[in-house]
Amino acid sequence: MADGAGKVLVIKLGALGDFVQALGPFAAIRRHHGAARLVLLTTAPYQELARQTGLFDEIWLDSRPRGLDLAAWRHLRTALRGGGFERVYDLQTSDRSSFYYRLFWPGTLPQWSGIARGASHPHANPARDTMHTIERQAEQLRMAGIETVPAPEEVLTGRDFEQADAPFLAPLGIVAPFALLAPGGAAHRPEKRWPAANFAALAGQLLSDGVQPVLLGTAAEADTLADIGAACPRALDLSGRTGLVDLVRLARAASAAIGNDSGPMHLIAAAGCPSLVLFSGASDPALCGQRGARVAILRRPHLQDISTDEALAALKTLRAG
């Protein structure tokens, strides 16, 4: 099924890093299906970013029904069965999203790309879980007849996200040149966080070089950013003040970025910002590393083994590249 004017559903629920890495597949599906009406099923945090790509005709929000919430399951099933979809691309490929295939029964089933049992276009590679997300999704689409998948960076840099020019930066207190620092990460994975004291020392060194450090994070990470700000008061704290589209705009204007292996660093790197990402032994960049034309990765078994001087040197190399 290519071109035509049917309806196609794409499923991608999250998380942020995975969503960013699906931007290329989104664009490939849009191109392959030409005039078809393309619908994205996602979750609320990614709605605005998806809308800004301009790739979808409709964006549906999944409430992710639980267990015996029969009303929510019934609502989702009714929407899926009434959608008139000729093909579904399950880019989430989780137990949950695979179960959604069963919600179409009984009746006419759509063509399905994914790992659900009975899928018409299965990603039939038993080693799929050993592949980087980008290569895995590209192979899934090839098995469904889509040969070429662009990189996420091609999608973000090819869209008009309203450049982060002076009118956007000035109200935030940002003065170029500036560097983005993303010291956060999953609260339950402290082993994936470079020490806040190291970020504070790095921020001070950036200031000495005439570069304004800008701290990024969610409201839940405000304490970490406050600790860095206390040690380096001239660092600008934007915790809880930036949405995903704002991050794209900031990344386009920043001279560099450094952060832990996290969703925001996927988005910043894909926006074309020279990005240094810090990995511990807790995650493998070969499977989930950030991608982009100017991305470097520093990895040590323990993040505290990465010195501030080492990180600063790598960041300077990126900025000069």
Image (cartoon, helix red, strand yellow):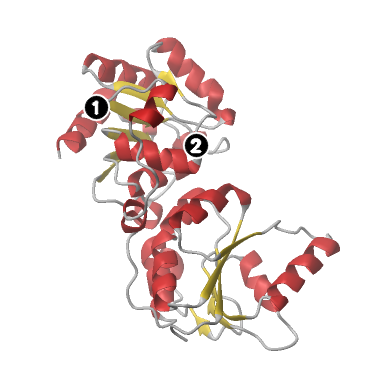
Find numbered disc 1 in the image and state the secondary structure of the residue it sits on: helix
Image quadrant of residue 199? top left
Residue 50 place in picture, x, y as percent? 50, 55
**Figure quadrant of residue 233:** top left
What percent of the width, then of the height, locates residue 201?
33, 17
- Classify residue 320 as left or right of residue 129: left
How many residues crowd around disc 1 within 10 Å: few (fewer than 14), some, or many (20 or more)? some
Instruction: Please say if 107 is above or below 190.
Output: below
Read off the residue under disc 2. 185
Q: Secondary structure at mark 2?
A: loop
* Residue shown at the point (44%, 15%) measured from the top left: 229
Q: Is residue 262 visible?
A: no
Q: Residue at x 23, y 18 (%)?
A: 210
What residue is pinned by disc 1?
312
> How far, Cα to Cα, is label 1 from label 2?
20 Å
Quarter the C terminus occupies: top left
* Residue appearing at x 40%, y 77% in the figure: 32
Residue type pointed to by label 1: Leu
Question: Which residue reaches farthest left?
Answer: 320
Q: Nearer the viewer, residue 134 or 28?
A: 28
**Front-most of 90 and 50?**
50
The x, y position of residue 275, in whole percent, is: 30, 40
Location of residue 63 in the rendering, given as x and y in whole percent from the top left corner: 71, 56
Residue type marked 2: Gly
Q: Nearer the viewer, residue 300 or 6?
A: 6
Q: Is 307 on the left-hand or right-hand side of 12?
A: left
